[in-house]
């Protein structure tokens, strides 16, 4: 299966598999440390950067927000959806 640590693709694929979904149906949230955002995006996940606790990837060009409290509202916005089959199953 490969290395099971961020940012290796295998860890993101395994997470999606255990959730019973495709990576394209997943949302990954992180501060960007160790290339984690790019790793999630590389397997097709939508990656969000949060700066609530750390600002480790200021060059990230993808979606970002400050507090995790804003994630549910962010997920309800259609602009982040990269594929029509992506949907929010539970954001609370």
Image (tube, helix red, strand yellow):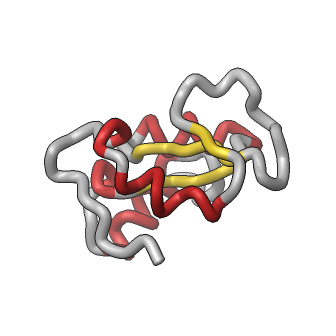
Question: How many numbered marks appear?
Answer: 0
- Residue pictured at 53% horizontal, 30% vertical: 62
Answer above or below: position of 19 versus 81: below
- Residue pictured at 46% horizontal, 51% vertical: 74
Residue 66: percent from left, percent from top: 70, 47
Answer above or below: position of 20 versus 67: below
**Left or right: residue 40 compared with residue 33:** left
**Closer-to-camera residue (80/17):** 80
Answer above or below: position of 50 versus 5: above
Q: Quadrant of residue 91?
A: bottom left
Residue 42: percent from left, percent from top: 44, 35
Q: Which residue lies furthest to the left in this view?
A: 84
**Closer-to-camera residue (35/78):** 78
In the picture, the quarter occupied by the N terminus is bottom left
**Left or right: residue 4 compared with residue 57:** left
- Residue pictured at 76% horizontal, 43% vertical: 33
Residue 28: percent from left, percent from top: 51, 53
- Residue pictured at 36% horizontal, 47% vertical: 77
Residue 59: percent from left, percent from top: 70, 21
**Closer-to-camera residue (84/23):** 84
């Amino acid at each position: 299966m490969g290395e099971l640590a961020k940012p290796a693709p295998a860890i993101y694929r395994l997470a999606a598999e255990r959730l019973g979904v495709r990576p394209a149906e997943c949302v990954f949230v992180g501060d960007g440390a160790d290339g984690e955002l790019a790793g999630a995006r590389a397997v097709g996940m939508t990656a969000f950067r949060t700066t609530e606790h750390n600002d480790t990837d200021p060059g990230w060009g993808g979606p970002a927000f400050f507090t995790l409290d804003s994630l549910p509202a962010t997920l309800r916005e259609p602009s982040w959806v990269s594929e029509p089959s992506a949907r929010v199953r539970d954001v609370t």
